[in-house]
Image (tube, helix red, strand yellow):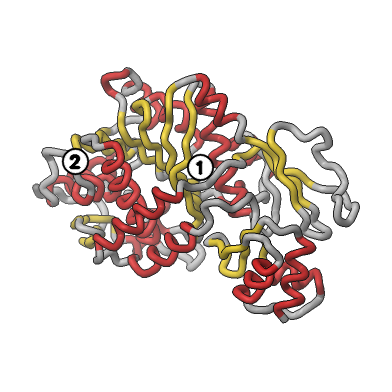
Amino acid sequence: MTYKFPFPTESITEGQINLTITRLNLYAKSPSEYIPAKAPVFYNPLMEMNRDIAVLALRVYQKRTGKKLRICDLLTGCGVRGLRFAREVKQIDSVILNDINLEAVKMAQFNIEINELSSLVTVKNHDANIFLSKNASHEKRYDIIDIDPYGSPTPFLDSAVRALKNGGLIALTATDMAVLCGVKDLVCTRKYFGKSLRTEYCHELAIRLLINALVFSAGRHNLGVNILFSHYTGHYVRVYAQIWCGKLKANASIKKLGYILHCFNCFNRKWKFNIPRLIEGKCDVCGRKMRVAGPLWLGKLLEGEFCTEMITELKKEGNMRTGKRLSKLLHIIEKEVDTLPTYYVIDKVCKKMKTNVPAKQKVIEKILKEGYKAVSTHFNPIGIKTNATIRIVEKGIKNAL
């Protein structure tokens, strides 16, 4: 196929796919600009690891279900995500790429043909919600819907859960971290149905708020949510969840929503399912007023076996460009499976204590000796997830110096 695009392009490879994309360096006017958003057709090279993880997750899901997958890449841009699924995941029935941008549709079609995937991949040019609504009947629903927007995925959640088969997988990216991390309270409540806080563990709150929005959207349609995997990486959060039909499953998901209460004075925190009697009561450690985040998801952020199976798939792959970083990330996340909500950031606690910052591993060892659980977290390189109280964490820091 030959097509002359009305803007400069370049050829690259990602995973096992050859791609024609917009020549991004032509759209950089200042170092702080988000260049992909300026380009005529969206492609973000910084999200390659995001797409690598998606490939691994879909492989594990396919093996578990044994299905030939029908996949929707809802906001496709140049088509890279859906094309990688078609090439790198086995047992694909079909992949539908969709974008409202006509130039993106043309570029995606071009990339389909240069990769010789026309038998598996089709591209559509529709508004995302209209497209999903047209595919909400039982015979048209998808096994997997991947939503990777520039900003928030919440405008598409109600349509997406209706267009998924029972037990289908939804994959969501949210890049509006200022909203999710407590900078814009009203916007967060409006988009995610919950309130955040500007705490040291705000990136975990971001994931829990994204899941909160998904649970509410699914619950409206008598659907329950089962979280398989989630992660925070740099400028975004990402969630993979199975959606199950049934009022009882919907109710069970709603019961896992609650609130986190945080003391900004001593860093004590609590979490409560349902609505606490005193939403912003006094801290039982220092007596100061506590602040509340929520409602948000208080359940697990991943299924341990799912993460382990992703690590196995990565070892089989062997040639992903992000392989080393990805392996490190997955191994850290794997250890977080049974941890409680929130985490402590050592230097933040040390600043409050007016003391030096000890090595993280030494602090973990001291907390373990006190009989509590403690592991590193992928959310922060000097963060610790533990079931210990703030006083035990402070004791661990003192003993580690």
Q: Quadrant of the C terminus?
A: bottom right
Instruction: State the image coordinates of residue 282 (x, y, percent, origin top left).
Output: 87, 46
- Type of amino acid under label 2: Gln
Query: Vertical placement of 286 versus 86: above or below?
Result: below
Q: Residues within 10 Å of mark 1 (few under 14, many from 20)?
A: many
Q: Residue at x 68, y 63 (%)?
A: 371
Q: Give the mark nearer the N terminus: 1 vs 2.
A: 2
Q: What kind of element bears circle 2?
A: loop
Name the disc covering residue 152, or none: 1
Give me the C-alpha separation between circle 1 and circle 2.
30 Å
- Looking at the image, residue 301 sits to the left or right of residue 121; the answer is right
Instruction: State the image coordinates of residue 240 (x, y, percent, origin top left).
Output: 43, 43
Q: What kind of element bears circle 1?
A: loop
Q: 7 or 173, which is in the foreground?
A: 173
Instruction: State the image coordinates of residue 328 (x, y, percent, origin top left).
Output: 42, 67
* Comparing labels 1 and 2, the label whose residue is closer to the camera: 2
Residue 178 in view in this figure: no
Residue 337 in view in this figure: yes
Task: Choose top left, top right, bottom left or bottom right for residue 142.
Answer: top left
Q: Residue at x 64, y 76 (%)?
A: 362
- Looking at the image, residue 364 sits to the left or right of residue 309; the answer is right
- Looking at the image, residue 324 sits to the left or right of residue 20; the answer is right
Query: Vertical placement of 368 versus 164: above or below?
Result: below
Pointer 2 residue: 91
